[in-house]
Each structure stands twice: as structure tokens, then as C-alpha cells.
Amino acid sequence: MSCKIPPSVRLWCIPMNSNDTIAAIATPPGSGAISVIRISGPAAAEVLQRCTGRVTPPRLATLARVQDAHGRVVDEVVVTRFVAPASYTGEDVVEFSCHGGMLVTRRVLERLLQCGARPAEPGEFTRRAFENGKMDLTRAEAVMDVINAGSDLALRAAQNQLHGAICHKVEAAVDKLISVAAHVEAYIDFPEEDIAPDTTQQLTGALDEVCAELRALLATADEGRLLREGIRTAIIGAPNVGKSSLLNMLLGYERAIVSDTAGTTRDTIEESVSLGGLRLRLIDTAGLHESEDAIERAGMERSRRAGAEADLILEVADATLPPARAELPPGSARHILLLNKCDLAEHPDWAGVEALRISCHTGRGHEQLAERITALFLHNTGELDTLAAINTRHRYSLQQALDYLLAAREGLLAALSPELVDVDLRAALDSLGSISGRVDTEDILTRVFATFCLGK
Ligand code: GDP
């Protein structure tokens, strides 16, 4: 099933200005083996001709020389030319792979600008792809999700979205709703007829199905946030139980200062680590104990706040000492008790206490911790191919659509006039349409593409 934007809607989404040819460096700033500069637009081949003296064959990586206005070589490059509509943007595109130095890349870009291209805005390539019907809005957003993915599962969800996971679900809901709306609108044309009770039942049944599908998508919102942003993880526990050691074990290198003196981890340190396919944003905390030391108290206050904002609390305790539990911060975070130093003899009073036994010195328990966290946060890891990670914009539109559908359902049951029911159905369709960009405003497009990096 294709989610391309139908021609009628394409007309509606008038491009900012696609008559010109845009250029941008598509690779990150800095030195590397190669840099890629892309141009897209109707004059792409002309720009290529002007700066290299030739138009290379399409879809064939071809060696060429970019020359300045006096015929001096700026750089030797590999050119790949794509002819519209078979390109990322749907326009004529040329990609120049030049040597990866900052200066040489800039000079090649400047030459392309002299030859008729203009600098692209961030996200403008993908916006053109959207406007030319190459992808719907959810896929356009997925491009940045793929680029920004910080864990394997986030990448998986972004790839699914890029292949239409969310778009397909929304389109299926739209199809069902259109047939409900068509039914209701048929009654508007015959005002003397009331909607028959069994038709009402049939229509509310269809609405219930759509509502259930929207609720199922909305239920993934939290997972979407956790996949995109990572799980905010607070490590708490008394001094010297091994909190910094745990952080270091997870990171795989010495990041926090580990010491025998209580209270050395004075500040909160945030690091990201990929565990079990998820990204944990770890916050190592100052020891949660009373202290006279002002700096340490400030550190503890920060760690209390971090704990309160966390999605996950890893509470660390020392297995060699009698059981002592940390004060858990308020909030709805999930919690795992870790009994550390299990390479040493366990204090007998811990017998029977349910905890994950780990050793930051030997690495014991590392894998089980990954499994425990994945099980706590992801409900559908069995169905990774359908893992969807809706974003805040999708969530807002889905919720809006759901509210309108519930109003339409009530209207049907209360035998309101079909016109009134139809208003809600149409509003729900608009909300769903805004997810894929079928129905959209300049404002939403500007917001979505403003989050893009240059050259995408
Ligand atoms: P924090 O104050 O809770 O951050 O604790 P640290 O990570 O600084 O560790 C305190 C002490 O416990 C250090 O001497 C660590 O080497 C030691 N330690 C940490 N984890 C383990 C472990 O798994 N086994 C053993 N035997 N010692 C550990």
C-alpha cells in the first residue's frame, strides 16, 4: 500500500519555492575522507555543466573536476546524477562527493552557488520530497528519527515508520471513517429519512473499531518518547555501595570518579548508554545521605530532583553490609533493586530479599539487568516489525481525532441531525489527515521541517 500524497492534495500543499535549485553540504562539519554536497532543482544539470564542463550520465558515479571561474581545479569529485522524478526529492539531483576537508568542501559549495544554486534551508530537501509526493509527513519525520536514533530499538521504530508503519495505520482508520462519513452524508441529502437504528448500530460499531485503533496507537506514545529521548535513569543508594562503579560498568569506561571516601560524587553526571536495545540516560547521583557540606548538599538536592524526574530508578545496595534501603524519590518511576558486590560474601540478612544480584567488579548481572529493563519498558518487543514510536505531534492529532470521534458517536446515539454528526466526523478526518500531511497548514510543515539538519 502506498502512502503517497494524492495529486489533489499536492496542489493544496504549495511549495515555498521549488523553481530554484538548492545546495547544501549533506555530511557533518569537520574533516573526513569525503564530504557530500547535494543540489536539487530544475537547474541541477545546468549547475553541474557550468562547474565541471559536462553533464555526467545519470545514476553512474563519475569522476569529474569542479573548476572555478578561471578554469582552475577546485577539487576532483565523484558526481552522481539523478533525474526527476527518480530521486530523493523527486527533482533533478546531483551529489558531489569531494575530499572531506572543511575548506575544500566550502569552496566546492561556493562554486555551486556561483553556478546558479542557492543555499538550502535546514530540511528543505526532505520538504521538497514531501511536496513532490515522495513521502508523507510521518515518513519525512522518520528520516530525522533514523538519523537521531540513539539505540537499536529507536532505530528499528524509526525504520518501521520510514516504511509507513504509522502512515498505514492512520490511512486504514481514515478509510473506515470515510465510509462512515459517506453513510451519514447520504442522510443529509435525504432529510425526510431518519438514520435507522440498525444503521446507527453499524456506524457506531465502525467508530468503535477506529477508536480502538487510535487508542492502541496512542498507547505507544510513552514508548515513543522513551525510544526517542532515552529512559531517564537515576542511580540512587547510600555512599560507597557502588553507584559510580555501576555507571562505569554500564558505560564501559571510567567516567565517574570511584573512591573509597563517602560523598566523592558531588554532582550529578549524565551519560547515555545503550542497554538491551534501549538508550538509558544515566544520572549518577551524589550519595543520598545527610551532610553538613554545602556543596555536597547542593549535589544531593540535584540528585533528588533527578530521581523525581526519572523514568527508572536503579537503587544500589551493598550486599556485604546489613540491609539498608535508600529513600525513594516521589514519582511514578519504575524501580529495580540492585544488590552490588556479589563477588564478596553476601550478608545473611539479605537472604530471601528479591533483588538483582550484580558485581560491578566482575560484570555479573549486566545482561540480566538489560533484560529486566527491556521487560519493564517495552510491551511489544515480540513484534519488533510493527514497533511504532509516535511523536508528540502525532499524539496530539490522534487525541484530537479520538475526541471528535467520541463526540460523533454520542451524536449518532442521541439521534442528532446527520449534519452535526458529520461536522465531528470531518474534524476527526482532518486531524488524522494532518498526521500524514494530507491536510495541513504551512505552520505545521514549518515546525516539522525546522527540526531537520542542513542537507536533509
Ligand atoms: P558510590 O559512592 O556509591 O558511587 O560507590 P563507588 O562506586 O565509588 O564504590 C565504592 C567502593 O566500592 C569502591 O572502592 C569500589 O571499588 C567498591 N566497589 C564497587 N563495586 C564493587 C563490586 O562489585 N565489588 C567489590 N568488591 N567492590 C566494589
Image (tube, rainbow, N blue to C red):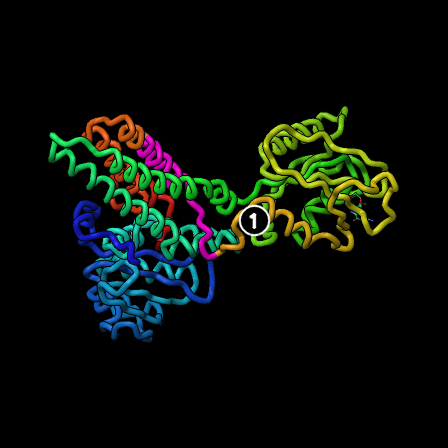
Q: Quadrant of ligand 1?
A: top right
Q: Residue 296: percent from the left, percent from the top?
A: 71, 30
Instruction: Tell me what residue is drawn at x 58 percent, y 40 percent.
Output: 232
Q: Which residues are magenta?
A: 385-406
Q: Going by the image, does 118 lie left or right of 299?
A: left
* Mark 1 lies within 8 Å of ligand 1 (Cβ measured): no
Find out whether residue 277 is within the magenta segment: no
Q: Residue 174: percent from the left, percent from the top?
A: 28, 45
Q: Going by the image, does 342 lie left or right of 412?
A: right
Q: Residue 46: percent from the left, percent from the top?
A: 19, 65
Instruction: Tell me what residue is drawn at x 18 percent, y 31 percent.
Output: 194
Instruction: Tell me what residue is drawn at x 78 percent, y 40 percent.
Output: 353
Q: Give the position of the C terminus as an image quadrant.
A: bottom left
Question: Which residue is denoted by mark 1 in the rendering?
Answer: 279
Of the pair 18 and 62, the residue shown nearer to us: 18
Of the pair 313 and 190, the residue shown nearer to us: 190
Give above or below for 398 relative to 119: above
Find out whether residue 389 is within the magenta segment: yes
Quarter location, residue 111 = bottom left
Q: Residue 312: percent from the left, percent from the top?
A: 61, 39
Instruction: Tell me what residue is drawn at x 47 percent, y 60 percent.
Output: 31
- Kind of residue sitting beneath label 1: Arg
Q: Give the position of the N terminus as an image quadrant.
A: bottom left
Number of marks present in the image shown? 1
How dense is the environment of label 1, judged by Cα within 10 Å: few (below 14), some, or many (20 and up)?
A: many
Of the pair 133 and 296, the residue shown nearer to us: 133
Give above or below for 63 relative to 304: below
Give above or below for 323 relative to 107: above
Q: Secondary structure beneath disc 1?
A: strand
